[in-house]
Amino acid sequence: KIDYQVVDDGIYYDSIWAYEDDYSPDFDMYLWDWDGYADPGDTLASFTTAQIENWNEPCWSDAEFDAAVAEANATLDPERRKELIWRAQQIFYEQSPEIVTDYPQKLEAVDTSRWDGWTRMYGGEGAAFYTSFVRDSYMNLRPKAATAEQSGAGGLTIVAVGVVVLLGVVAAAWFIVRSRRAAVEEE
């Protein structure tokens, strides 16, 4: 029999980061939601021994995993990095410190008719905003330049401006001619 409770976030945090005289987490199991980071090295680094009492909530430790993640985050060779990340993922899978129970679909509505630069995570498959890990959308988002078709005015704007300018010139000429006539009549 499993005895479970739905609790407030505060109880979760107090149980995970429980301190009396020392760090002593107080839970058997928990269900939580979490997104990985855009870079797998950052996601995997969350579960290294050094992250116990921080991001490593299950308090899991594996020396081979730690070494693979450290080397993956330090190497500049993309192929070597890929091998190390895959090895770290395999260790994580085999040890199962956390078990993925679902892959939720996230629905976001964005206005592409008026904005350019929406950038989705995970090669175009993930979120475009509403997560701290999607900086590209916030940095790239710009209002679209209005085209003549979008504004609905097209060439009529030019005609209207021309008419206003012409009326202004005619009115100015009329006032100048009138003021000269008035000055001549006074003499």
Image (tube, grey):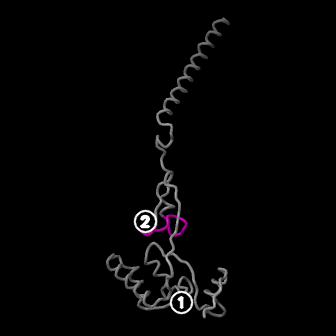
Q: Quick check: is 183 in the magenta stretch?
A: no
173 sits to left or right of 9 = left
- State if disc 2 and disc 1 touch (CB < 8 Å): no
Vertical placement of residue 183 versus 118, above or below: above
Q: Residue 49 at what x, y percent from top left?
A: 49, 88
Q: Residue at x 47, y 63 (%)?
A: 136
Q: Write the start and end of the magenta stretch as one range.
A: 121-135
Tag of residue 59: 1
Labelled disc at residue 151 = none
Q: Quadrant of the C terminus?
A: top right
Query: Which quadrant would residue 65 be assigned to in this image?
Result: bottom left
From the top left corner, tell me how far across and down residue 64 is, in percent.
Answer: 41, 90
Q: Is residue 131 magenta?
A: yes
In the rendered image, residue 183, in percent from the top left (x then y), is placed at 64, 10
Q: Looking at the picture, does residue 18 appear above or below residue 117?
A: below
CA gap, disc 1 and disc 2 = 33 Å
Looking at the rendered structure, the secondary structure element under dot 1 is loop
Q: Is residue 73 above or below residue 118?
A: below
Location of the N terminus by quadrant is bottom right
Q: Nearer the viewer, residue 143 or 124?
A: 124
Q: Nearer the viewer, residue 135 or 182?
A: 135
Res. 43 in view: yes
Predominant secondary structure, magenta span: loop
Q: Which residue is mark 2?
A: 124
Residue beneath the point at 46% across and 43% down = 147
| Marks 1, 2: nearer the viewer | 2
Q: Position of residue 116 (x, y in %)?
A: 47, 54
Q: Earlier in the sequence, mark 1 or mark 2?
A: 1
Number of callouts in the render?
2
